Image (tube, helix red, strand yellow):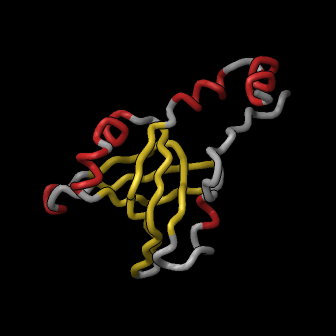
């Protein structure tokens, strides 16, 4: 049985299982599949996104101003790269979004045959 395809993390993205390493306030980038988008009515326009990579999950907070700037990626992205600041509160780590990029196109690489995928990755 062949090994499962590997996902090539976007450059400079921290795996989610390492979010406890950078100090609070550090600027980092994370990437992963969008599991959940929440926009509670009581949150005054704030959106909460949960991303998952192969190592775990990451909680992202998108303030209204960032949502307006990156609306298309926030609404339609199946996979996102988020650059922002680490925030720790009550034992929970969040990333406060400063830049959001839709990287859904990277998911297509996972379903390509291995031969095509390896040729594409060597480019």
**Would you place residue 115 above or below residue 106 in this image?**
above
Residue in view at x 50 percent, y 32 percent:
104
Residue in view at x 50 percent, y 67 percent:
27
Q: In the figure, residue 48 lies in which quadrant? A: bottom left
| Quadrant that contains the N terminus | top right
From the viewer's perspective, tell me whether residue 20 is left or right of residue 85: right
Q: Nearer the viewer, residue 35 or 1?
A: 35
Q: In the figure, residue 63 lies in which quadrant? A: bottom left
How many badges with numbers are in the image? 0
Q: Nearer the viewer, residue 100 or 78?
A: 100
Q: Position of residue 118 (x, y in %)?
A: 80, 26
Residue in view at x 63 percent, y 54 percent:
12
Q: Position of residue 29 (x, y in %)?
A: 54, 57
From the viewer's perspective, tell me whether residue 42 is left or right of residue 108: left
| Quadrant that contains the C terminus | top right
Q: Position of residue 24 (x, y in %)?
A: 49, 78
Residue in view at x 51 percent, y 73 percent:
26
From the viewer's perspective, tell me whether residue 32 is left or right of residue 69: right
**Would you place residue 9 above or below residue 95 in this image?**
above
**Would you place residue 87 above or below residue 65 in this image?**
below
Q: Position of residue 3 (x, y in %)?
A: 81, 33
Residue at the right extreme?
Answer: 1
């Amino acid at each position: 049985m062949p090994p499962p395809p590997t996902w090539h993390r976007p450059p400079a993205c921290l795996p989610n299982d390492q979010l406890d390493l950078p100090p609070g306030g550090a600027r980092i980038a994370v990437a992963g599949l969008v599991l959940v988008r929440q926009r509670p009515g009581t949150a005054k326009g704030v959106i909460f996104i949960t991303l998952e990579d192969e190592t775990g999950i990451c909680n992202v907070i998108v303030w209204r101003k960032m949502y307006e700037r990156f609306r298309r990626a926030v609404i339609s992205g199946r996979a996102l790269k988020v650059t922002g600041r680490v925030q720790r509160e009550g034992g929970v780590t969040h990333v406060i979004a400063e830049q959001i990029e839709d990287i859904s196109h990277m998911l297509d690489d996972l379903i390509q045959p291995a031969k095509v995928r390896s040729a594409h990755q060597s480019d």
